[in-house]
Every structure is written in C-alpha cells, then in structure tokens.
Image (spheres, rainbow, N blue to C red):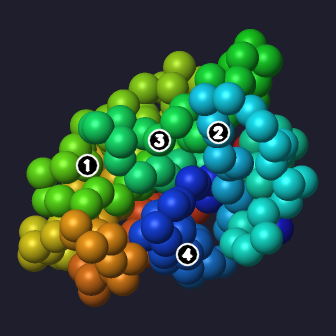
Amino acid sequence: MPDILVLYYSRGGSVARLARQIARGIGEVEGMQARLRTVPQVAPVTEVASPPEPEVGAPYVDKQDLRECVGLLVGSPTRFGNMSAPMKHFIDGLGSEWASGTLVGKPAAVFTSTATMHGGQESTLLTMLLPLLHHGCVIAGIPYTEPALTTTRSGGTPYGASHVAGTQDQPELTDEEAQLARALGKRIAQLALRLQP
C-alpha cells in the first residue's frame, strides 16, 4: 500500500498531535497509509550523538522514506516565524535528493504550531513550502470549502494545518484544528492517488 510520509519535529507535543491527526486523515483514503517519521535534535556543539532511534514516538526519518513515499507532509514548531533548526538541518541535507528528483511530482503540504495566535504560523508555513517547491513537489493547502477554516478561533490556515499552543504550551488541539489537520492529510492522500501513474 502506498505511503504518505508525515515528517515532523515536535518538542512540546503539539506538532506530534497534528501529525497523528494528519495520519488519521490519510487513513480515510482507501489504498493509502501514513508513515510517521521525525528528525533528530541538533545542537550548536555535538557532545553526544543522537540515539539510533528515539525512545518514544515516531522513528527517525531515513532518506529511503523520501524515495518510497507517494506524498509528503512536513511539520515543525515555529521558531521566530520559521521552521525549527532540526527540520531545517534535515532539509538542508537533501542535496542529492534534489539533484536526483526524488520528490518531483509528489503532492506535499506543511503544518506547524505556535505559542501565540500571531506567533508566525503563516510565515512558517510559507517558508516551509519553499524547499518543497525547489524539490518539485506539487503543493497543496487547505481550501475554504473546509468549513472549519472559516469558524476556527485558533489554528488553521489555507497554507496548512496549525495549532495555537498558548504560552503554557498546551498540546491539546481544538476540534477545528484537528478537523483541518485530518482534512489536509486526506487531501494529500487523494492527490497522491490521482497523480499515481
């Protein structure tokens, strides 16, 4: 069964919860399944190597996951209006995948979480899309035909799924945030089915 890669970095749990909702949406499309993966942390100075697999949560991503997937969703917490350093570090290391066209023609979307309503959700989503465009992905967002997009009072944008965690870093998603994350996963899975040769 074809896999949609749901690749994320999560520190407080919010982005991981979005990833699981996205995976649920992917699972709603017959013939598609989600493959959850994460990226290791980075540090300014390497003192101890990351373990080969995280102790909890999704396994670390391998470049083979990118080759095998038929669609891709990338998620990261917002760091000053941009993606987190671990996700950026991983994406910056995909030069050979860019040169070989590994992701060309695959549908892709993005998701994020911020501490505040105006904490840079949309700029993070847009900047996360730029490398995917360079890789030749077919970019998709959330259309306004999704009712929760116009009723949400927290996360959710046409540029991708999102969550407002608040200053206390609450990972629980609102109903609208969860609905929009599932809708985005379903949308990428449906596009992947249509784009299959």
Q: Is residue 22 visible?
A: no
Kindly indicate the quadrant of the structure image that contains residue 31: bottom right
Q: Residue at x 89, y 54 (%)?
A: 52
Q: What's the distance in space between the residues labelled 2 and 3, CA to CA?
A: 10 Å
What x and y, as percent, mark residue 72?
60, 49
Q: What's the distance in space between the residues labelled 3 and 1, CA to CA?
A: 12 Å
Kind of residue indicated by mark 1: Gln
User: Depth-wise, is mark 1 or mark 2 nearer the camera?
Assistant: 2
Kindly indicate the quadrant of the structure image that contains residue 57: bottom right
Disc 2 target residue:
42
The tag on residue 6 is: none
Kind of residue indicated by mark 3: Ser
**For residue 58, side relative to residue 167 (left or right):** right
Q: Is residue 175 visible?
A: yes
User: Quick check: marks 3 and 1 in contact, CB under 8 Å?
Assistant: no
What x and y, as percent, mark residue 88?
55, 32
The tag on residue 84 is: 3
Kind of residue indicated by mark 2: Val
**Position of 54 relative to 141 (above/below):** below
Kindly indicate the quadrant of the structure image that contains residue 93: top right
Secondary element at tag 4: helix
What x and y, as percent, mark residue 173?
33, 80
What crowding class fits label 1: few (fewer than 14 Cα within 10 Å), some (14-19), or many (20 or more)? Answer: many
First in residue order: circle 3 vs circle 4: 4
**For residue 40, side relative to residue 167 (left or right):** right
Q: What's the distance in space between the residues labelled 3 and 4, CA to CA?
A: 19 Å
Disc 4 target residue:
20
